[in-house]
Amino acid sequence: EVQLVESGGGLVQPGGSLRLSCAASGFTFSSSSMTWVRQAPGKGLEWVAYIKEDGNDKYYVDSVKGRFTISRDNAKNSLYLQMNSLRVEDTAVYYCARGRVGGVFWGQGTLVTVSS
Amino acid sequence: QSVLTQPPSVSAAPGQKVTISCSGSSSNIGNNYVSWYQQFPGTAPKLLIYENNKRPSGIPDRFSGSKSGTSATLGITGLQTGDEADYYCGTWDSSLSAGFFGGGTKLTVL
C-alpha cells in the first residue's frame, strides 16, 4: 500500500523556522519526483516546491524562494521542506505528493500555523 | 494570482453533465500535460485526470478530460450529489519553471 505521511507541522512565530518531513512507503521513492503543495485556510491549492528523483534539480514558487529548501534522502525514503523566515501568509496545510504537480499519491497533510 | 483561470463555481442537476474550464497560456497548458483533482473539505486532493485525458485506476468514466490549445476542460456526466466538491486543474509552466493550480471550481449538484 502506498503511503505518504507528513509530520513536523505546528505553531511557530513569524520569523521562525520549521522542518517538515514526508515518509514514503509502498513505491520506489528513489525513482519518483516529489512535490510540496500547500493550502491556506479556506483557499485553493498552491504548488510550493518540486525536487527531481536524484535531488539535483529543485524548483520553488516565487513567494518562498530564498526561505524554503526542499530536499530528500532516498536511503530513508523521505522528503523534507525546511522553512525559514516564516510569515503569517505561510499558514497552511502542507501536503507532499508524488510527481511534478501533484499526482496520484498524496499525504494527509500537516498544518503549519504562523502566528504571534 | 494563478496563471490558470477556472470559474469559481458551476452547478447542475443530478444526472446532468457539467464542464469545468481551465484557461492558461502557451508556456503552461499549451506545452505541458494538464491534470485534474477533486477535493472534499478537510481531505487531500484526489487525482481524477492526468496527462490531459487519462483516468487513474478506479476513477469512473463519468469523468473525462480534454485539452485544446491553451485551455483544458474537465467533464462530468451523470452528476451525483456525491460529486459536490472543489475541482482544480494543474500543470507546469515551462517559462516560469514552476507548477501551478487553477483557483479551483466549486461544483454544486442542485
Image: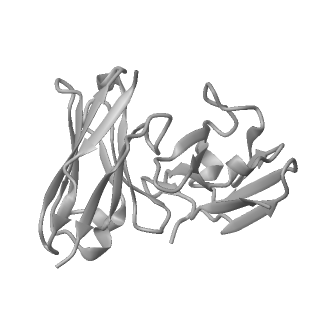
Q: Is residue A46 visible?
A: yes
Q: Position of residue A26 (x, y in %)?
A: 35, 21
- Image quadrant in which the C terminus of chain B is located: bottom right
Q: Residue furthest right?
A: B16
> What count of labels does the image hold?
0
Q: Is residue A6 above or below residue B54?
A: below
The quadrant holding residue B102 is: bottom right
Foreground pick, B17 / B92: B17
Q: Is residue B68 visible?
A: no
Q: Residue at x 75, y 64 (%)?
A: B10
Foreground pick, A7 / B8: A7
Q: Is residue B47 above or below residue A114?
A: above
Foreground pick, B94 / B82: B82
Q: Position of residue A56 (x, y in %)?
A: 24, 37
Question: Image check: A29 left or right of B76?
Answer: left
Q: Residue furthest bottom?
A: A116
Q: Residue at x 19, y 50 (%)?
A: A8
Q: Residue furthest left?
A: A16
Question: Image check: B56 left or right of A91?
Answer: right
Q: Position of residue A76 (x, y in %)?
A: 17, 26
Question: Image check: A9 left or right of A26?
Answer: left
Q: How is the image coloured?
A: one colour
Foreground pick, B63 / B91: B63
Q: Residue at x 39, y 25 (%)?
A: A2
The quadrant holding residue A90 is: bottom left
Q: Position of residue B33 (x, y in %)?
A: 60, 41
Q: Residue at x 28, y 64 (%)?
A: A64
